[in-house]
Image (cartoon, rainbow, N blue to C red):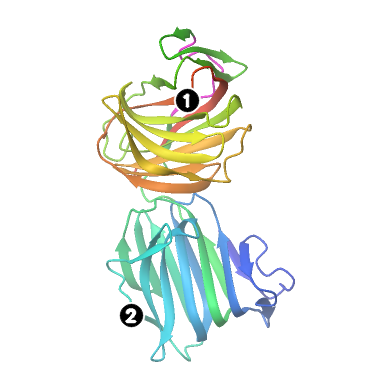
Amino acid sequence: YYIERFEDRQSNPLPDWSVDAGAGSLRVSNGYLVVDGYAAAFLGDETWYNARIAFGDGVYEEVNEFHVMMHMQDERNYMGMSCSRSSGFLVCGGVEVVNGAESPVNGFGQGTRLCAEGQMECTIAFQVIDGRYSVAVNGQEVVAFTDSTFESGAVGFAVDGAYSVNYILVYEPPYGASTGYTLFRDDFDTDGWSAEVDDDDYAVVTKSVEGGVYRWEVEAKQGVVASEIREVLQTAETDGYPNRFAYSARTRQVSGPADAAHGLLFRARDYDNFYYFRVTNEGEAGLYALVENEWNELVTPVYTEAYKPGEVNELRVVTEAGRFSFWINGVYLFQANDSRFPLGSIGMAVELVEAGQVGEFEFDDVRIAVRAR
């Protein structure tokens, strides 16, 4: 856990946090962290499933807005609470923020009173344990709700106005039931995948396992999506694979045109039915479903600076039943909901869009992780 006390902090009050604050708006005075104006700070990453953040002895008498974020994917996607002063109280409500759009949270309505003005020792704690969110004031739980929109993510807070707090504690509690496990992993030190030359009407695809990577060399005869599916034991558990899991791989486009693409297949029923997390070498990422050999666009491609052309990139998809979230190099991209393929295997694909194009691609460190509730 992290505990930030401010008795000896001056030049950098929050050294381990990512901070967004104007000049002079964040300082330490008499052992308190003091905000004059606007300041926001964030801590943690996408591996934080359970978390608790507490603000010790906070003073809210001149706060205009106070926000706490949990399971942050980024500043536009998180669960949290939003507060302001009203009628002598700090009044709060739960918010779900998806792609910048706020929605209220059932079970934590706007107008929930937390701290009264003049209540000098008001400690607010916000936590999530296995999908159950709760808020406590001075150690007493005042509200709780459950939600599964975001399974993991960072924590953060934002303040507008005049605010001071004696300490901030961030704690990552242990999992309530199971810490999960790695169901499948392949770093391609052994030859367990298809290593052959496929020559058909679409392309010549040469696959080989060399130097600890799975290498594909593709020469297109027309636009082509070449794919490989790997059967993985299906446990048929509601809280396990293939219902709830994270699938990741390290990938690289070694050569080829900028509009070439590659990515991860999941819930693959066969070579005509699967989901395709697709990334181009120009940094555009999207989601598609191939249904009876017909393509369906589920998420329109979006540009991300997280993708590094020509370098090794980690692609990751996290599934929970029909809800999917997507990441590149630890950066959250988007979320999608779809239920047409409840079961299926994993795989990978490469794509060239025109006849005569040639490309080389590499895959490594394929991993399926399962975290049962």
Q: Position of residue 118 (x, y in %)?
A: 48, 91
Badge 2 amino acid = Gly
Q: Which quadrant is home to the N terminus?
A: bottom right
Left or right position of 25 against 112: right
Badge 1 amino acid = Glu
Residue positioned 62% across, 61% down in the render: 17
Let me know if residue 186 is in the magenta part.
yes
Residue positioned 53% across, 25% down in the render: 363
Cα gap from disc 1 to disc 2, whole angstroms: 52 Å
Looking at the image, is 16 positioned above or below residue 68?
Answer: above
| Badge nearest the viewer, 1 or 2 | 1
Disc 1 packing (10 Å; few <14; some 14–19; many ≥20): many
Please give the residue where the numbered disc 1 appears in the rendered image. 351
Closer to the camera in the image, 165 or 288: 288
Looking at the image, is 73 positioned above or below residue 35?
Answer: above
Which residue, as the protein is rendered here, is positioned at the far right? 11
Disc 2 secondary structure class: loop
Which residues, given as a range, are shown in magenta?
Answer: 184-195
Quarter of the figure with residue 136: bottom left
Q: Position of residue 159 (x, y in %)?
A: 53, 75
Disc 1 secondary structure class: strand
Q: Position of residue 163 (x, y in %)?
A: 56, 81
Please give the residue where the numbered disc 2 appears in the rendered image. 111
